[in-house]
């Protein structure tokens, strides 16, 4: 039987496909905008057929109806990263959170969390029978490789991406054809504070550097201030629309990369149609599983690697909290520590923690004397390099605790500097001129 016959034989409806999921199964759902929403909706609609199905994924971009209180006997969500749609369920004890560095998630599926069913979202097969994982390779491909059953949403609107992104029809058990646009992210709102942070971060970027960027207003603002740079490269867990503009402007060329020269290396993508059109069949963008892209031992091979990540709080010792507010888990470690450590090992590398100086409409300082009780430290004080706010840049690596506290107070919001200075003076018995 050739692959075309195999494909025709495996085509089923979504409602029929999810009947091959059994009570007690562990179901891994493809990541972020690669989520196969049509399959997930069918799974939820069939909830009466299940008890205690464990649903595992990172960022859920769909509606995540499986975490509704009335479905708790049918589904239990296990988040490896907490998103907006699943946060309340975790805080209320109806779902679970498993801490894990992003680059180690595939290992979880190989060793600790055996996968019964993988729900994936891929392109139509090419002339050789291979489908591309498109925007979500990350943990999605490794999960499919170890799953007992693979159910694929086949979507002609999924961009075909290059790299280690393919699965053959022989390795798909059930195929569901569903033609639908990908989830798109709206443009982040970049205000004056974000612009100042972006400008301060950009001051640390040199011609020829290789960048790791996240998503949101601050990474987008950084990109605004890189237009005078030359021959930047990308090795990042993800990119979004702002990178496309810099490629088109000739700023990002990847020409001076010493590792994967000429290519933007990523593991997943989130953005809008402009990004999806750009990556479609574009050999400049090379995608690989996250246990390659984010592994610090791999990423560090890029000389002059600059990582830029965000935070909820930084204390005066330099401890970085990025995933919780007190006892409330609001996100996850993601790739922050992966790339902070990769940058530390990179020849000429730098890591940046960038954040506004305040939260809650200016009523709360994000630079604090002590982190909130119950908060999880994401990046340790031993790992942190630069911290950036709209008020400046604090270089912490190589500094004493006293010097760190001084540098951080100077980039705190002016409304909170006196309060922080008082704590500093009590601790170090030294007057701080602010």
Image (cartoon, rainbow, N blue to C red):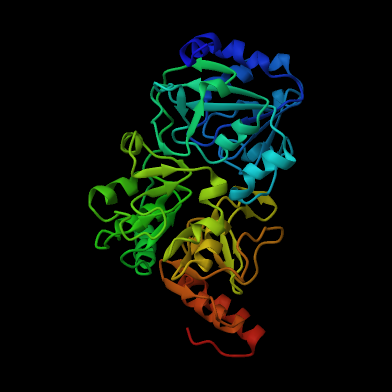
Q: Considering depth in this image, is 346 or 201 the residue closer to the camera?
A: 346
Observer able to see residue 191: no
In the image, residue 388 lies at what x, y percent?
Answer: 45, 67
Q: Considering depth in this image, is 393 or 148 the residue closer to the camera?
A: 148
Quadrant of the rendered image containing residue 261: bottom left
Observer able to see residue 274: yes
Q: Is residue 270 above or below residue 24?
A: below
Q: In this view, does 86 lie above or below 419?
A: above
Q: In this view, does 315 lie above or below 178?
A: below
Q: Residue furthest bottom?
A: 430
Q: Which residue is drawn at 44% across and 48% down?
A: 215
Quadrant of the rendered image containing residue 195: bottom left
Q: Considering depth in this image, is 235 or 9 the residue closer to the camera?
A: 9
In the image, residue 361 lies at what x, y percent?
Answer: 48, 56
Q: Is residue 9 left or right of residue 96?
A: left
In the image, residue 116 lies at what x, y percent?
Answer: 70, 27
In the image, residue 12 lies at what x, y percent?
Answer: 55, 10
Q: Is residue 2 left or right of residue 428?
A: left
Q: Which residue is drawn at 51% across and 36% down?
A: 32
């Amino acid at each position: 039987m050739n692959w075309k016959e195999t494909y025709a034989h495996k085509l089923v409806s979504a409602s029929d496909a999810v009947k091959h999921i059994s009570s007690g199964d562990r179901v891994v759902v493809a990541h972020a905008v690669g989520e196969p929403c049509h399959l997930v909706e069918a799974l939820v609609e069939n909830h009466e057929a299940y008890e205690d199905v464990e649903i595992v994924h990172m960022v859920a971009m769909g509606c995540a109806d499986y975490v509704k209180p009335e479905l708790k006997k049918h589904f239990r969500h296990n988040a490896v990263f907490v998103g907006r749609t699943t946060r309340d369920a975790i805080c209320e004890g109806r779902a679970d959170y498993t801490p894990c560095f992003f680059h180690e998630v595939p290992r979880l599926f190989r060793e600790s969390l055996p996968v019964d069913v993988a729900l994936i979202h891929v392109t139509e097969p090419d002339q050789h029978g291979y489908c591309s994982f498109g925007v979500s390779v990350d943990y999605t491909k490794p999960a499919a490789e170890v799953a007992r059953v693979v159910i694929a949403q086949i979507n002609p609107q999924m961009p075909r991406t290059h790299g280690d992104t393919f699965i053959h029809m022989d390795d798909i058990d059930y195929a569901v054809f569903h033609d639908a646009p990908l989830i798109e992210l709206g443009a982040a709102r970049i205000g004056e504070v974000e612009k100042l942070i972006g400008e301060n971060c950009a001051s640390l970027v040199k011609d020829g550097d290789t960048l790791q960027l996240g998503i949101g207003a601050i990474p987008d603002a950084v990109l605004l201030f890189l237009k005078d740079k030359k021959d930047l490269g990308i090795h990042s867990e993800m990119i979004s629309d702002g990178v496309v503009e810099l490629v088109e402007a000739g700023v990002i060329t990847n020409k001076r990369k010493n590792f994967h020269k000429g290519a933007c290396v990523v593991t997943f993508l989130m953005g809008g149609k402009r990004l999806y059109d750009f990556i479609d069949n574009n050999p400049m963008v090379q995608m690989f599983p996250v246990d390659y892209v984010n592994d610090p031992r791999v990423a560090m091979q890029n000389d002059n690697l600059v990582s830029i990540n965000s935070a909820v709080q930084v204390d005066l010792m330099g401890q970085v909290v990025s995933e919780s507010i007190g006892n409330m888990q609001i996100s996850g470690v993601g790739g922050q520590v992966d790339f902070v450590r990769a940058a530390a090992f990179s020849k000429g590398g730098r890591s940046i923690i960038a954040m506004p100086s305040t939260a809650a409409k200016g009523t709360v300082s994000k630079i604090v004397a002590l982190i909130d009780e119950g908060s999880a430290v994401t990046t340790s004080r031993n790992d942190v390099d630069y911290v950036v706010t709209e008020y400046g840049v604090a270089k912490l690596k190589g500094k004493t605790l006293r010097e760190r506290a001084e540098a951080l107070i100077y980039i705190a919001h002016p409304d909170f500097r006196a309060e922080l200075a008082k704590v500093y003076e009590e601790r170090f018995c030294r007057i701080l001129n602010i």
